[in-house]
Image (cartoon, grey):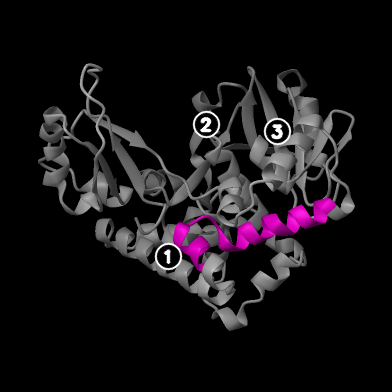
């Protein structure tokens, strides 16, 4: 399988324990290209001699189902890009993440030198990402230009898939604008600035298609933050992120050639400009989603300044909520969390600031280095 953003459709062949354990598995790769083969799985499963795995692009799989019977034997497994722990495994490191987990569980700082090393390792992951081809290329070449070329190829494949199901180009335009929209620091994705004359309510189908494709993560505005945020989410107020941070970095600068692009050097050396902090916001969105969290955020008016306070992410925990603010630096100011706490104190179980310094606590607020967000 050429890239992890494709989805495995694991087929549960039989529920009869009396049959002998099977020793062979047949893989139907790119099954979206042959819908009839997907339908035939039902008969193959009933035959009982083999296990089967289907792989394919979710975009095309969702579209290429006309006139076929979807087999009930399918068990769908959503595959995300490699997470940070899997990335370290690929590099031959099976120690670092276990050590980080121990310090996280014990709520202890790593120490300045160790934290700098861990942050640099995590920034490497942000640059390469979790797409298997990109990771393999980095391991074999240690050449960021070749890694960037692979990621551009993957983005081109995405664009091709988008055009197959949406010749109008709306999906491509919405996807391509993700970095610019996040950089704009608006309280929602500004659809009208991407698709002239359109509003969020006009493109709900396209947003669903992007989300279902596995290429995009959607964070919805929680109108009433609480453990039941799914019931109060606003479908017309959302933010979009890419499912892979490595692709996000390349997408943000794909109009420049690699030789003109110093984002790799700046990010790896921790010299990222403040206005590029949305890179960290995307990797936290990816991390939370990979860990099974639905993505929500919340904004509310600052009565004095008439500007909005914003909580970057909200996750549910034990019938309460955990507000999360993300910073691309070591700054410790947190007016949004303070104001949110005043407004919703009875609903909060834990407050977290994710930033680029070592672990610390300030009262009931936890400052979490970005490489520890994987444990949330």
Residue 166 in percent (x, y) is at 28, 57
Front-lying residue, 306 or 170? 170
Sequence-first tag of 1 and 3: 1
Foreground residue among 281 and 44: 44
Find numbered disc 3 in the image and state the secondary structure of the residue it sits on.
Answer: strand
Q: CA distance from mark 2 to mark 3?
A: 16 Å
Q: Is residue 270 magenta?
A: no
Determine which residue is flagged by label 3.
Answer: 323
Q: Which residue is mark 2?
A: 233
Q: Position of residue 312 (x, y in %)?
A: 67, 42
Q: Which of disc 1 and disc 2 is earlier in sequence? A: 1
Q: On residue 155, which mark appears?
A: 1
Determine whether 310 is above or below 254 in the image. above
Task: Please state the extent of the stretch shown in magenta in the rendering.
Answer: 114-137
- Tell me the residue at 42%/43% (across/down): 79
Structural distance between the alpha carbons of marks 1 and 3: 32 Å
Residue located 54% across and 73% down the image: 141
Asked where in the image residue 170 lies, by quadrant, the reply is bottom left
Q: Is residue 4 positioned above or below 323 on the image? A: below
- Where residue 335 appears, x then y in whole percent? 82, 41
Q: Dot 1: within a 10 Å radius of its alpha carbon, few (fewer than 14), some, or many (20 or more) residues? A: some
Q: Secondary structure at mark 1?
A: helix
How many other residues sit within 10 Å of disc 3, few (<14), some (14-19) or many (≥20)? many
Specify which label sits upstream in the sequence, 2 or 3: 2
Q: Quadrant of residue 154?
A: bottom left
Q: Is residue 19 left or right of residue 312?
A: left
Determine the secondary structure under disc 2: strand
């Amino acid at each position: 399988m050429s890239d992890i953003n494709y989805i495995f459709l694991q087929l549960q062949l039989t529920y009869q324990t009396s049959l002998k354990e099977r020793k062979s598995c047949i893989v139907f790769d790119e099954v979206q290209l042959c819908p009839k083969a997907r339908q035939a799985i039902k008969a193959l499963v009933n035959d009982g001699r083999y296990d089967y795995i289907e792989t394919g692009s979710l975009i095309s799989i969702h579209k290429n189902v006309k006139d076929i019977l979807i087999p009930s034997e399918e068990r769908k497994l959503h595959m995300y890009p490699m997470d940070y722990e899997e990335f370290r495994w690929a590099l031959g490191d099976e120690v670092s993440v276990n050590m980080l987990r121990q310090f996280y569980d014990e709520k202890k700082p790593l120490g300045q030198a160790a934290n700098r090393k861990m942050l640099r390792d995590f920034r490497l992951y942000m640059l390469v990402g979790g797409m298997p081809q990109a990771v393999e290329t980095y391991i074999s070449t240690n050449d960021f230009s070749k890694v960037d070329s692979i990621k551009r190829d993957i983005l081109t494949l995405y664009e091709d898939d988008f055009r197959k199901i949406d010749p109008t180009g709306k999906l491509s335009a919405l996807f391509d604008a993700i970095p610019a929209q996040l950089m704009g620091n608006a309280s929602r994705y500004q659809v009208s600035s991407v698709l002239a004359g359109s509003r969020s309510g006009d493109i709900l189908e396209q947003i669903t298609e992007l989300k279902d494709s596995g290429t995009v993560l959607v964070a919805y505005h929680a109108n009433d933050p609480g453990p039941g945020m799914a019931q109060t989410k606003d479908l017309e107020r959302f933010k979009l992120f890419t499912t892979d941070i490595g692709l996000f970095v390349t997408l943000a600068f794909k109009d420049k050639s690699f030789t003109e692009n110093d984002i790799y050097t700046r990010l790896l050396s921790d010299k990222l400009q403040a206005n590029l902090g949305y890179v960290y916001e995307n990797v936290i969105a990816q991390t939370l989603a990979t860990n099974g969290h639905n993505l929500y955020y919340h904004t509310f008016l600052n009565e004095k300044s008439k500007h909005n306070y914003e909580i970057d992410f909200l996750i549910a925990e034990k019938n309460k909520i955990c507000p999360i603010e993300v910073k691309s630096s070591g700054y410790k100011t947190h007016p949004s969390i303070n104001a949110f706490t005043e407004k919703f104190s009875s609903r909060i179980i834990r407050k977290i600031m994710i930033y680029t310094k070592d672990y610390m606590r300030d009262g009931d607020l936890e400052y979490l280095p970005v490489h520890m967000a994987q444990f949330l």
